[in-house]
């Protein structure tokens, strides 16, 4: 997506004046292309999905999860989300970094990522165990 197409898209979807001065700067990404969008009144991030990401990401779930974690205070507000194309616009978080190979190489980020992943798995297991108790299921053979 070139800058002129992005500007036209942003003017339409954000209801901006067609003469609005919009500055677009690429800010990285691993599977997506992310852009910092600056206008007179706004600082946003535009996410353009990478090739074939729709094959492994359920955009409806992603949209719902984005809204939930925003309400929890751990995600920026989603301004626009197209579940078909995967294009997303969020508020910009000052001093944030786009997830990238370089960021992953930083040990602290890797440790945090592992912690979050393990925490998610633990919560899923806890939910399944509680569900089994509720349904009075004594054991489950999955193999």
Image: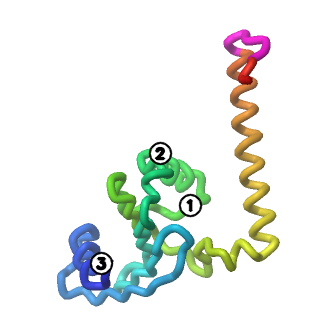
Query: Real-space Cα distance between discs 2 and 3?
Result: 25 Å
Q: Which residue is mark 3?
A: 6
Residue 13 vertical position relative to residue 122 in the rendered view, above or below = below
The residue segment tinted magenta is: 134-140
Count of residue discs: 3
Determine the residue positioned at 54% across, 74% down: 29
Left or right: residue 74 versus residue 37 is right
Predominant SS along the magenta part:
loop
Query: Real-space Cα distance between discs 2 and 1?
Result: 15 Å
- Residue 141 position by quadrant: top right
Nearest the camera: 27 or 66? 27
Q: Which residue is mark 1?
A: 75
Dot placed on the residue nearer the N-terminal end, 2 or 1? 2
Dot placed on the residue nearer the N-terminal end, 2 or 3? 3
Residue 108 vertical position relative to residue 39 in the rendered view, above or below = above
The crowd level at tag 2 (other Cα within 10 Å; few <14, some 14-19, many 20+) is few
Determine whether label 2 and label 1 are within 8 Å by CB: no
User: How far across and how far down the image is residue 113, in percent?
Assistant: 73, 61
């Amino acid at each position: 997506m070139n800058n002129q197409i992005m500007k036209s898209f942003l003017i339409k979807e954000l209801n901006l004046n067609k003469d609005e001065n919009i500055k677009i700067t690429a800010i990285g990404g691993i599977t997506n292309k992310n852009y910092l969008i600056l206008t007179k009144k706004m600082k946003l991030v535009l996410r353009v999905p990478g090739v074939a990401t729709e094959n492994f990401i359920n955009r409806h779930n992603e949209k719902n999860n984005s809204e939930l974690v925003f309400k929890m205070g751990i995600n920026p507000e989603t301004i626009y989300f197209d579940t078909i194309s995967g294009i997303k616009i969020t508020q910009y978080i000052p001093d944030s970094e786009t997830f990238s190979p370089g960021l992953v190489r930083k040990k602290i980020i890797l440790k945090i990522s592992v912690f979050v992943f393990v925490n998610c798995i633990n919560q899923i297991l806890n939910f399944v165990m509680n569900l089994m108790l509720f349904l009075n299921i004594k054991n489950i053979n999955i193999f």
